């Protein structure tokens, strides 16, 4: 049961961090155009994006992590090593793979934040944070 709860928490963590990064990247683009959004507008945009991408991005993240976390656990069992490194890596790779697979199969980048290499890596970072969350809550380590 601990692993199931850790999985769901890691999905939420990945979603919130990935969406936050995406929104902030858009805000930085606006600043690059010479516009300065008010803090209230930035916070409102973050909230709208968290709610607005629940039906699209959240299920994709859930699927990616549903594959990645058990694979990390199995690889750690078979090959040894630090479980934290396996889960961080699995989350990172899962979110990057999600975007690469979407682009390869659909011919488009589904989320603006993943269009640049930095954006893609930052989405991977959100996956790594999810891996860290899974490690902490799923193994009882803190």
Image: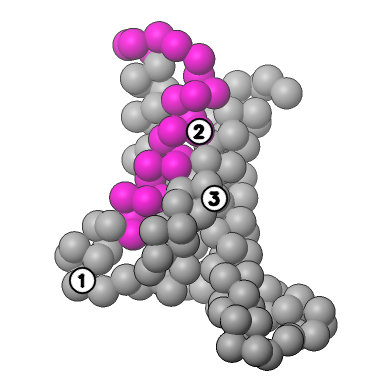
Q: CA distance from mark 1 to mark 2?
A: 27 Å
- Residue 116 vertical position relative to residue 75 in the rendered view, above or below: below
Label 1 Cα neighbours within 10 Å, binned few <14 / some 14-19 / many ≥20:
few
- The percent coordinates of residue 75 (x first, y second) are 34, 20
Question: Which residue carries the number 1 mark?
Answer: 106
- The percent coordinates of residue 86 (x first, y second) are 45, 25
Residue at the spot 46% in from the left edge and 61% down from the top edge: 119
Queried whether the magenta region covers residue 18, the answer comes back as no
Q: Kindly state the secondary structure of the residue where label 2 is placed.
A: helix
Residue 71 located left or right of residue 132:
left
Magenta stretch: helix, strand or loop mostly? helix
* N-terminal-most mark, 3 or 2: 2
Residue at the spot 37% in from the left edge and 51% down from the top edge: 96
Q: CA distance from mark 3 to mark 2?
A: 10 Å
Which disc number belongs to residue 88? 2
Q: CA distance from mark 1 to mark 3?
A: 23 Å
Residue at the spot 50% in from the left edge and 19% down from the top edge: 83
Which stretch is magenta? 77-99
- The percent coordinates of residue 41 (x first, y second) are 75, 85
Residue 1 shows in the view: no
Residue 135 located left or right of residue 97:
right
* N-terminal-most mark, 1 or 3: 1
Label 2 Cα neighbours within 10 Å, binned few <14 / some 14-19 / many ≥20:
many
Residue 67 located left or right of residue 31:
left
- The percent coordinates of residue 108 (x first, y second) are 26, 74
Queried whether the magenta region covers residue 87, the answer comes back as yes
Which disc number belongs to residue 126? 3
């Amino acid at each position: 049961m601990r692993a199931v709860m850790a999985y769901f928490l890691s999905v939420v963590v990945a979603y919130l961090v990935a969406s936050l990064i995406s929104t902030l990247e858009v805000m930085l683009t606006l600043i690059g155009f010479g516009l300065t959004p008010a803090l209230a507008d930035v916070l409102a945009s973050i909230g709208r994006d968290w709610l607005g991408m629940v039906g699209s991005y959240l299920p994709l993240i859930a699927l990616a992590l549903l594959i990645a976390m058990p694979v990390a656990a199995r690889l750690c069992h078979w090959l040894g090593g630090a479980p934290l490194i396996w889960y961080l890596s699995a989350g990172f790779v899962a979110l990057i793979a999600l975007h690469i697979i979407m682009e390869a199969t659909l011919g488009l980048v589904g989320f603006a934040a993943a269009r640049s290499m930095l954006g893609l890596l930052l989405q991977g970072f959100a996956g790594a944070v999810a891996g860290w969350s899974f490690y902490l809550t799923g193994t009882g380590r803190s």
